[in-house]
C-alpha cells in the first residue's frame, strides 16, 4: 500500500468573480441614485505623462466606471505639466458639483510632489483614500474613504468566512498605498498585525507563523511556497509582468497553493478588487455629497 502525502490544493480566492458580483450591485445602486437625484456619480481621473502601464490602468478604471453607471471625466496631461497647473485643475475639480471623486494616477513625474498633490484633493472626493485625513480617520477607527487595495483585500478575506479577531497577520511591505493602510484595516478588524519591510531581519520566520499573509512588497516571487503555514490565507498584492508576457505576484504561487487554505491568483485576485473599491468609494462620496447616507 502506498501512502500519499497530502498535497491538498488551496481554495482560490477569486477576485474577478467577487469583483463582477460587487460591480453588478454597485451598478444597480448607481442607477437608483441617478434616478433619485437626477445625475450620475462622477469620477475625475487625472493622468500626467505617457507611461503605457498607467494608461492601461486608467483605461480599465474608465471602463469599470462606464459599466457601473458612473460618469468619468478624464484629464490626460503632458509629462511636462507643472505642479502649479495640476494644483489648479484639482482646485477646479474640488469645486465641480458633477465630480464626486478625484483620482490622480500614480506615479506622477519626478518634478511633481505626490504628497502635495494628494493633500490638495478635497478629502470628501479622495476616492483613493490616500489623503492624510482619510488615513487618519482609519487610524482613529472611524473610516471615511478607505484606500482601495487594502479595502479590496478586506472584502476578499470576508469571502473566506474567517473571523479575523486575534488572527496572526503578516503584511509584507509598508508602503503608504498598501502596507500601512492594510495594517490599519486588519487592526480595526481585531487581528494581531505584523508589518515586515526592507529592514525586517528574518522574513521567513514571520511568514512561517502567519495565519494570514498580505504580500505587498513589489518583489516578484519574494515569498517562497515552503514558508507558508499549512492552511494559511495568502493575499498577493504584487503584480509583475514576466518574460513571456504573463503576470505573476510576490508569492511563488505553484508551491504556496499546495500549502495555503486560500490564495489569490495573479491576475484575477486583488487587481480587479482595487478598481471595484474605487467604484464603491465614488458612490459613497456621491451619497455623502447629496446627503443620501
Ligand atoms: N492613484 C492611484 N490609484 C490606484 O489605485 C493606482 C495607482 N494610482 N497607480 C497604479 C496602481 C496599480 N493599480 C492597479 C489596479 C488594477 C489592477 C488590475 O486590474 N489588475 C488585473 C490585471 C490587469 C492587466 O492585465 O494588466 C489583475 O490583477 O487581474 C492592477 C493594478 C491601481 N493603482
Ligand atoms: Mg485606487
Image (spheres, rainbow, N blue to C red):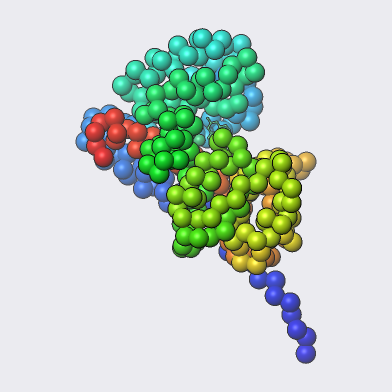
271 relative to 135, above or below: below
Q: Is residue 102 above or below residue 227?
A: above
Q: Quadrant of residue 213?
A: bottom right
Left or right position of 25 against 270: left
Q: Residue furthest bottom?
A: 1
Q: Nearer the viewer, residue 96 or 72?
A: 96
The one nearer the camera, 181 or 47, is: 181
Report the residue at 41% width, 40% height from top: 140
Q: Is residue 159 visible?
A: no
The image quadrant where one finds the C terminus is top left
**Left of 293 or right of it: where is 165?**
right
Residue 124 appears in view: yes
Quadrant of the rendered image containing residue 101 = top left
Query: What x and y, as percent, mark residue 96?
Result: 34, 19
On the rendered structure, is 290 left or right of 177? left
User: In what quadrant does ligand 1 lie?
Assistant: top right
Q: Residue 126: where, in percent of width, then height?
A: 43, 29
**Residue at 56% across, 35% down:** 176
Query: In what quadrant of the picture does the N terminus appear?
Result: bottom right
Q: Image point 51% across, 9% down: which residue?
A: 84
Spot occupied by residue 14 in the image (x, y as percentages of width and height): 54, 55
Residue at 78%, 41% in the rendered image: 243
Amino acid at each position: 500500500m502506498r501512502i500519499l502525502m497530502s498535497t491538498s490544493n488551496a481554495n482560490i480566492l477569486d477576485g474577478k468573480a467577487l469583483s463582477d458580483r460587487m460591480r453588478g450591485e454597485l451598478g444597480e445602486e448607481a442607477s437608483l441614485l441617478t434616478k433619485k437625484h437626477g445625475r450620475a456619480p462622477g469620477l475625475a481621473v487625472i493622468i500626467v505623462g505617457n507611461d503605457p502601464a498607467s494608461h492601461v490602468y486608467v483605461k480599465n478604471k474608465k471602463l469599470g466606471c462606464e459599466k457601473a453607471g458612473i460618469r468619468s471625466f478624464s484629464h490626460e496631461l503632458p509629462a511636462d505639466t507643472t505642479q502649479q497647473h495640476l494644483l489648479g485643475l484639482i482646485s477646479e475639480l474640488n469645486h465641480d458639483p458633477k465630480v464626486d471623486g478625484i483620482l490622480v494616477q500614480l506615479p506622477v513625474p519626478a518634478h511633481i510632489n505626490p504628497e502635495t498633490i494628494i493633500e490638495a484633493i478635497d478629502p470628501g472626493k479622495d476616492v483613493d483614500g490616500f489623503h492624510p485625513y482619510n488615513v487618519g480617520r482609519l487610524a482613529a477607527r472611524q473610516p471615511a474613504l478607505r484606500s482601495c487595495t487594502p479595502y479590496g483585500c478586506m472584502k476578499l478575506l470576508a469571502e473566506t468566512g474567517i473571523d479575523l479577531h486575534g488572527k496572526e497577520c503578516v503584511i509584507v511591505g509598508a508602503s503608504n498605498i498598501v502596507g500601512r493602510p492594510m495594517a490599519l484595516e486588519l487592526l480595526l478588524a481585531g487581528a494581531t498585525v505584523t508589518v515586515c519591510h526592507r529592514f525586517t531581519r528574518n522574513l521567513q520566520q514571520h511568514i512561517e507563523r502567519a495565519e494570514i499573509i498580505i504580500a505587498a512588497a513589489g518583489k516578484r516571487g519574494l515569498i517562497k511556497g515552503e514558508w507558508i503555514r499549512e492552511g494559511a490565507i495568502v493575499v498577493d498584492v504584487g503584480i509583475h509582468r514576466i518574460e513571456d508576457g504573463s503576470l505573476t505576484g510576490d508569492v511563488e504561487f505553484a508551491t504556496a497553493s499546495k500549502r495555503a487554505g486560500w490564495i489569490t491568483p495573479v491576475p484575477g485576485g486583488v487587481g480587479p478588487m482595487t478598481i471595484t473599491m474605487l467604484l464603491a468609494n465614488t458612490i459613497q462620496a456621491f451619497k455623502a455629497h447629496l446627503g443620501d447616507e
